[in-house]
Image (cartoon, rainbow, N blue to C red):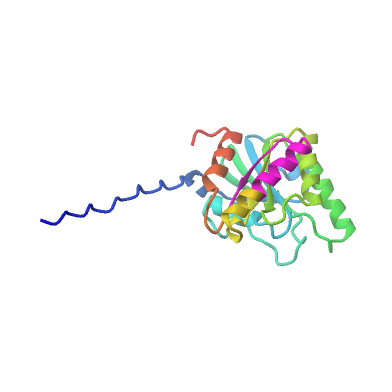
Amino acid sequence: MPPMNKPPTKRAAKPAIDNRYYRQAHFLISAGKAHQFPQGGHEVAFAGRSNAGKSSAINTLCDNKGLARTSKTPGRTRLVNFFELDEEHRLVDLPGYGFAKVPVAMKNEWQKLMTQYLSEQAPLKGLVVIMDIRHPLNDTDWQMLEWCQHFQLPAHILLTKADKIKRGAQQNSLLKTRKLLKEAEVNASVQTFSALKKTGLEELATKLNGWLELSH
């Protein structure tokens, strides 16, 4: 009697990432002046250069493609957008930075608003700094990280668009970024992320949960 072939071993299903809490995010207010910033509770802000994938990261986290909208004209959005998770927790979408064609007056206005937000917004518990994994740590990225250091604000770097390069190149970029941060004595955590593949989503949610003091 011929030997019976063993049935193929079934791979354990990968547990789904539980981001149900972030799915309840909804638009609260767009603020152009510091006195309009909501107070109380806890919030985490997202900052990044144009086309680095900031809006996509927020939308993927909240499973809502239309939550954080992008402007077709770089530098056009100058408002700080607040999204409410519940009465005590918020996500914040900061205006994109690093635009060569933006008028000097607009740059100065943006810098003033950002300085006020980072230095005076008591509910702010941490800043997610978005960078394209293919060319992270531009001059304006370093400036943002220096602001975080100056205001003693925790920073978490999201190396986005990881799906654009191979896994080996992803790890190389991750390790190089960590090395440069260590050499510059900048205390910031780093991870890879892909909005398309949703890789790194669980790690991001875990970081935010800690900053927002959530038990989810």
Magenta stretch contains residue 145: no
Q: Position of residue 120 (x, y in %)?
A: 77, 36
Residue farthest right in this picture:
104
Q: Nearer the viewer, residue 88 or 166?
A: 166
Residue extending farthest to the front is 1
For this rendering, which residue is in front, 75 or 30?
A: 75
Residue range (magenta)? 173-194
Q: Residue furthest bottom?
A: 72
Q: Residue furthest left?
A: 1
**Residue at 81% in and 45% down:** 143
- State the residue in front, 139 or 74: 139
User: Is residue 162 shown above or below 44?
Assistant: below
Q: Is residue 192 magenta?
A: yes
Of the 4 image quadrants, the one containing the N terminus is bottom left
Whole-percent x, y for residue 39 in the image: 68, 37
In terms of image quadrants, where is residue 210? top right
Does 32 sit left or right of 85 as displayed? right
| Residue 54 location (% of width, % of height) | 66, 54
Residue 24 in sight: no
List x then y, in percent, for residue 126.
67, 38
Which residue sits at x=71%, y=41%?
179
Examine the image and state in which quarter residue 203 appears. top right
